[in-house]
Image (cartoon, grey):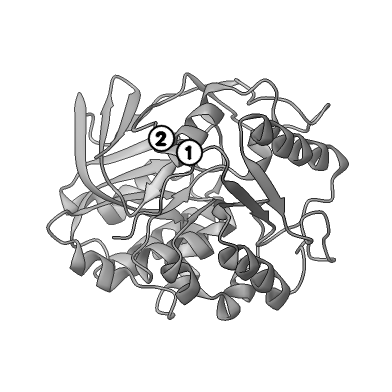
Amino acid sequence: MIIPKYIQKGDTIGVTATSSGITNELKQKRVANATVQLREKGYNVLCTDNLYQADWRGCSSDGKTRARQLNDLLSNEDVTCIISAAGGDYLMEMLDDVDFEKLKANPKWFQGFSDNTGLVYPIVTTCDMAAVYGCHIGDFGMKPWQKPVEDALGVLEGTKKKLESYAFYESQRHEYVTGYEGYYSDGQVQWINARGEDKIEISGRILGGCLDVIVFLLGTKYDGTEQFIRKYADDGIIWTLESFNMEDVVLITHLWQMKQRGYFKNARGFVFGRPFMYNTWIEQPYKEAVMSILGDLEVPVIFDADIGHKGPQLSLIEGAVAKVTSEGGKGVLEYA
């Protein structure tokens, strides 16, 4: 497993819009302030030209342009980390033109979530390189920084090896008033052990992302799951998954498909984030839908962890060896 060099003051952080661009004025203020505050922390910041533009679909540019701007950051020897501008829907359009060989030759961190699973997952499973499933650049634009943002930078710097679940989370999407808001605290964090265990401990290699995106990568050349779980069979896999917008039937069939492909055969356990939008016509709870597929695997399953769209979220170093503990509604993630 290739672990990129942790970033340090004086390095350049690249920012690019791999999916949607930032056109909302308040969000633009937030991103601009993120660059200011990262510079105040001692970093240089280099933004690509597509950051503040979008077509009628919300995409920052066509796939080839997005890939070219990402490749420019990959080629820039001063850039040691690349952070996504936002999620979206059409990141996959750029994949055929991304220079993954250049990334392997010059390893650097990539961080993003949601649609950016389309980059994080191939980097981990086909390039055998760690990447971060974590917040977009805008979170670094809140002021003052809250602990999750401090943690996110600490993970990239290699100074934060132990992350603890947060006290509260955003139970719904909120509109910005100033553009500098921190995370809203309208939901209390409560990790749930699926079978009512007092304590769960899982050790293994982290793998996962946004399930909505993983499923359309399955079976393509950007899906290296089989080789990844085979290479790291002795470590075992901690699957870290979250969903953005799924009905119960879709959730069940996607997990069934992954199970049928043998992707869960070396699973040490599963950690699910809080689902952002979940619909069911038969009033089937999210947890029951998941357990209808995973229940017979006889490995621990954790729900409502600090992963994904209902922030704040833990920075997950996908591909890294880690230990996850869940006890008393709280969680701890420790990197080896």
**Residue lying furthest right in this view?**
25
What is the total number of numbered labels drawn onto the structure image?
Answer: 2
Name the image quarter holding residue 286: top left
**Residue lying furthest left in this view?**
234
- Left or right, 314 with respect to 329, comes to right
Asked if the residue at tag 1 contacts the one at tag 2, i.e. Cβ–Cβ closer than 8 Å, the answer is yes
Q: Quick check: can you spot residue 245?
A: no
- Left or right, 197 with respect to 302, comes to left
Label 1 crowd (10 A; few <14 / some 14-19 / many >=20): many
Which residue is labeled 1 in the image? Answer: 274
Q: Is residue 277 above or below residue 223?
A: above
| Image x and y of residue 254, in percent | 41, 64
Q: Is residue 132 above or below residue 306?
A: below
Residue pictured at 49% horizontal, 40% vertical: 8
Which residue is labeled 2 in the image? Answer: 305
- From the viewer's side, name the closer residue of 297 and 240: 240
Label 2 crowd (10 A; few <14 / some 14-19 / many >=20): many
- From the viewer's side, name the closer residue of 154 and 114: 154
